[in-house]
Image: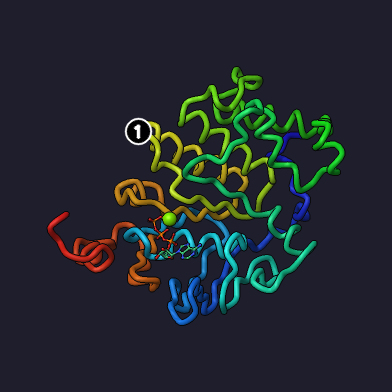
Amino acid sequence: MTAASIDAGAVADEPVDRSLALRGLRKEYVRGTPVLRDVSLTFAGRGLTAIIGPSGTGKSTLIRCVNRLVEPTAGQILFLGQDLARLRGAALRAARRRIGMVFQEYNLVERLSAIENVLCGRLGYVAPWRAWLRRFPREDVDGAFDLLEAVGLADRATQRADALSGGQRQRIGIARALMQQPDLLLADEPTSSLDPKTSVEIMELMVELAGKRDIPVIVNIHNVELAKRFAQRIVGMTGGDVVFDGAPGDLREEHLKQIYGGEAWL
Ligand SMILES: Nc1ncnc2c1ncn2[C@@H]1O[C@H](COP(=O)(O)OP(=O)(O)OP(=O)(O)O)[C@@H](O)[C@H]1O
Ligand SMILES: [Mg+2]
């Protein structure tokens, strides 16, 4: 069985509702100074949503609240029948396993090989002693190879992460996230450290692999052109508020002025 074909949470003839609903999501790092101002958004259970907005506007905070890397101050995060904002301990760990995350700076373990980094996506699933001894079940190793192949890096399996290029690292980052068999994929500026061509390839890969798994993807991205090219929906944020929410074709210059402020840069 390949990683892509395993779907522990799903019954074959009963599709999973993977929609995500944020209700009044608020974050204050400093009391009384909201960085997210009661954001309410519903994300469909499939397709890619791009979140755009100027630096410091709360995009990373928003997606980090979803997987609880950041503690929300108030509001609900409804996903797979649970309020993620309320989860603690084992329930939180279980929910986190189902949320894949792709980072701008890849967050790989440098001294581990490509395949071991991909297998890190299974850490939430296997017994700690197996992970400690790096003895992953055969089907996990097979699944990791399948994913390496899917991201075009089968021939780099044993190469250390620190010997890979940025684009290759991000491919590993995507493979690792998918190795979790996630029900949701979050990506925080996955292409910001990459050249334009590699950026397109990475976006294509995320769309393709998430499409195969039929899961929703939420991507924070600074490149508006890439957002328009790959997203079904664009959410524009400014100062912790959503100021645009619509199809890429509806995003006009006036919206960009509102999102980013001013027009000299346009
Ligand atoms: N751990 C933290 N403690 C205090 N303030 C924080 C913390 N993390 C972020 N902030 C502040 O919250 C605001 C939003 O930050 P966030 O990283 O979510 O913005 P962003 O939209 O992702 O920006 P960028 O486009 O630069 O990545 C910023 O003013 C930032 O300084
Ligand atoms: Mg950010």
**Residue 108 higher or lower than 115, as above or below:** below
Q: Which residue is mark 1?
A: 195
Residue sitting at x 37%, y 62%: 56
Direction from residue 222 to residue 8 in the image, left or right: right
Residue sitting at x 64%, y 67%: 79
Q: Helix, strand, or loop for circle 1?
A: loop
The residue type indicated by label 1 comes to: Asp
x then y, percent, for residue 238: 33, 68
User: Is 130 in front, or is 46?
Assistant: 130
Residue sitting at x 83%, y 29%: 138
Quadrant in which residue 235 is drawn = bottom left
Quadrant in which residue 139 is drawn = top right
x then y, percent, for residue 47: 50, 54
x then y, percent, for residue 215: 59, 52
Tally the marks.
1
Q: Residue furthest bottom?
A: 32
Residue sitting at x 79%, y 46%: 125
User: Is 87 in front, or is 218?
Assistant: 87
The residue carrying pointer 1 sits among few (fewer than 14), some (14 to 19) or many (20 or more) residues within 10 Å by Cα, namely few
x then y, percent, for residue 250: 28, 62
Direction from residue 234 to residue 265 in the image, left or right: left
